[in-house]
Image: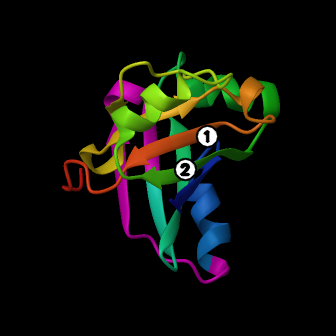
Amino acid sequence: MKLDHIGIAVGSIEEALKTYQSLGFHVEDIVTIPEQKVRLAILPIGESRIELLEPTGANSVIRKFLERKGQGIHHLCFEVENLEQRVNELKQTSILILDQVPCQGYGNRKVAFLHPKTTHGVLIELVEEGSAGSSL
């Protein structure tokens, strides 16, 4: 398992990029994932990346997060070998899985989120290593 990315909720990708680019980050990609009502800016950092998350709709999970908590770290994402197997293993524990069936994330990869109430206040995303492999 390795850290795939850190998701950071922002009100405006363009405004946030001013800060991150002044820190030396470069933008690899900017995409919209309509199913999740989110726009992403991908900023590589070593073998991982930062994903800036901007809501694209009034009922976006990211908009709700921004209203409750403001801008900041939204989630950590870890890469796993077999997502469905890992989700089934976690169902046998006290960890609550928000996505009983993996959904589509950036790059058409399969993802599932774990409820922060059962992961010490941190929203955790799991992504399957190499799943679907193409960028959006």
Q: Is residue 11 left or right of residue 14?
A: right
> Do labels 1 and 2 touch, CB within 8 Å?
yes
Which residue occupies 37% across, 39% down? 83
Residue 66 can be seen, yes or no:
yes
Q: Circle 1 sits in a helix, a strand or a loop, which is it?
A: strand
Q: Nearer the viewer, residue 79 or 43?
A: 79
Locate residue 62, reporting x and y percent.
59, 31
Q: What's the mark number on residue 124?
A: 1
At label 2, the amino acid type is: Cys
Quarter assignment of residue 64: top right
Could you say where residue 37 lies in the image, as x and y percent from the top left?
43, 28
- Give the secondary structure at mark 2: strand
Q: What's the magenta region?
A: 22-40
Residue at x-position 66% and y-position 36%: 123
* Residue ID at (65%, 26%): 95
Which is more N-terminal, label 2 or label 1? 2
Mark 2 surroundings: few (<14), some (14-19) or many (≥20) residues within 10 A: many
> Which one is in front, 73 or 34?
73
Instruction: Check the image and report above or below for 121 versus 42.
Output: above
| Magenta stretch contains residue 29 | yes
| Residue type, numbered disc 1 | Ile
**Residue 41 % position (x, y):** 46, 56
Q: Which residue is mark 2?
A: 77
